[in-house]
Image (cartoon, rainbow, N blue to C red):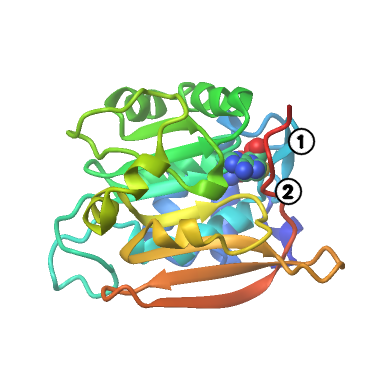
């Protein structure tokens, strides 16, 4: 993952082609999704460089190769599973996908995820800074495709503390107090059944967590997968990407992948 300069391009298509050639994107569906979302709508400067860019409020839009790897890692839990003959896709056939993007920042990855879950799915972008929640919405509204995702409710941006996860109804279910501090705690007390209906096939965390928060693991569906950078906590400011998988029986497996550098998952600034 250290050949960033070889991935950069002069257009969105060029950048995606380079990520493909360098095998950071390996799945054709992922390539298509990246081609559909113009990074220039989300990165205020050098959108086709393979590097993180500042977006204000101490946040950055992650580098394209990190977005690519996150999506490739979550892919079996993103694509709608049509029937049991779909071996690479994990989950119950016909069940609409539910995806949570914690620390949605620019909204770029939220948009790419929405392209993959298809028309029945829902993706929630969660931010603890209201101005960044609005930035994600504004960026997405720059394209007709993005506006359609917002208007249909297939993408929703919310304000909340990502360390606690999020509770959100599926399309067709009644809406809670929209946009406000909804009540993950209320959902938590209503037991496993409700969790399973309201939980997440995939959780992406875009900021480094102090720990592998249990509440996030709890909110994973069975099956489900989380992609999360976590501080090593050894005083060296090391962080590693972890995946947490929950199988169809509810068994949890945690895997440490590789070292990264993300902004921290913190309290909201006052
Ligand atoms: N995926 C985003 C990453 C933005 S940087 C992108 O590529 O654009 C990480 C984001 O996490 C920042 O926007 C920051 O505001 C947000 N964040 C940090 N702590 C958080 C918390 N506790 N809850 C929700 N969001 C948080």
**Residue 262 percent coordinates (x, y):** 71, 53
**Residue at image point 25% right, 40% down:** 170
Q: Is residue 158 left or right of residue 262?
A: left
Closer to us: 145 or 193: 193
For ligand 1, tell me if the residue under mark 2 lies within 8 Å.
Answer: yes
**Residue 114 percent coordinates (x, y):** 37, 43
Residue with the mark numbered 1: 58
**Residue at image point 33% right, 48% down:** 189
**Residue 210 percent coordinates (x, y):** 68, 59
User: From where the camera sits, is residue 11 visible?
Assistant: no
Ligand 1 falls in quadrant: top right
**Residue at image point 48% right, 69% down:** 244
For ligand 1, tell me if the residue under mark 1 lies within 8 Å.
Answer: yes
Quarter residue 145 falls in = top left
- The quarter of the rendered structure image containing the N terminus is bottom right
Q: Is residue 259 above or below residue 36?
A: below
Tags 2 and 1 touching, CB below 8 Å: yes
**Residue 179 percent coordinates (x, y):** 43, 24
Residue with the mark numbered 2: 263
The outermost residue toward the front is 189
- The quarter of the rendered structure image containing the C terminus is top right
Q: Is residue 267 left or right of residue 126?
A: right
Closer to us: 134 or 176: 176
Q: Is residue 165 above or below residue 79?
A: above
């Amino acid at each position: 993952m250290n050949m960033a300069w070889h991935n950069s391009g002069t257009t969105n298509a060029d950048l995606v082609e380079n990520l493909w050639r360098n095998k950071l994107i390996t799945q054709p569906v992922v390539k298509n999704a990246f081609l559909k979302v113009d990074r220039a709508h989300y990165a205020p400067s050098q959108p086709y460089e393979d590097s993180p860019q500042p977006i204000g409020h101490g946040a950055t839009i992650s580098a394209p190769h990190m977005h690519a790897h996150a999506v490739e890692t979550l892919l079996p839990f993103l694509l709608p599973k049509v029937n049991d003959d779909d071996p690479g896709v994990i989950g119950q056939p016909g069940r609409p996908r539910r995806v949570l993007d914690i620390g949605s920042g620019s909204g770029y990855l939220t948009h790419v995820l929405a392209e993959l879950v298809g028309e029945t799915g829902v993706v929630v972008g969660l931010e603890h800074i209201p101005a960044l929640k609005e930035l994600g919405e504004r960026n997405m509204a720059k394209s007709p495709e993005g506006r359609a995702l917002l208007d249909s409710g297939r993408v929703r941006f919310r304000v909340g503390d990502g360390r606690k996860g999020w509770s959100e109804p599926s399309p067709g279910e009644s809406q809670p107090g929209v946009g406000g501090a909804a009540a993950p705690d209320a959902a938590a007390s209503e037991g496993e059944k409700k969790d399973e209906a309201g939980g997440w096939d995939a959780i992406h965390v875009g900021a480094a967590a102090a720990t592998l928060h249990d509440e996030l693991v709890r909110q994973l569906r069975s099956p489900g997968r989380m992609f999360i950078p976590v501080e090593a906590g050894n005083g060296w400011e090391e962080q590693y990407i972890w995946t947490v998988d929950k199988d169809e029986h509810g068994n949890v497996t945690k895997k440490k992948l590789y070292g990264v550098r993300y902004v921290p998952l913190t309290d909201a600034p006052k």
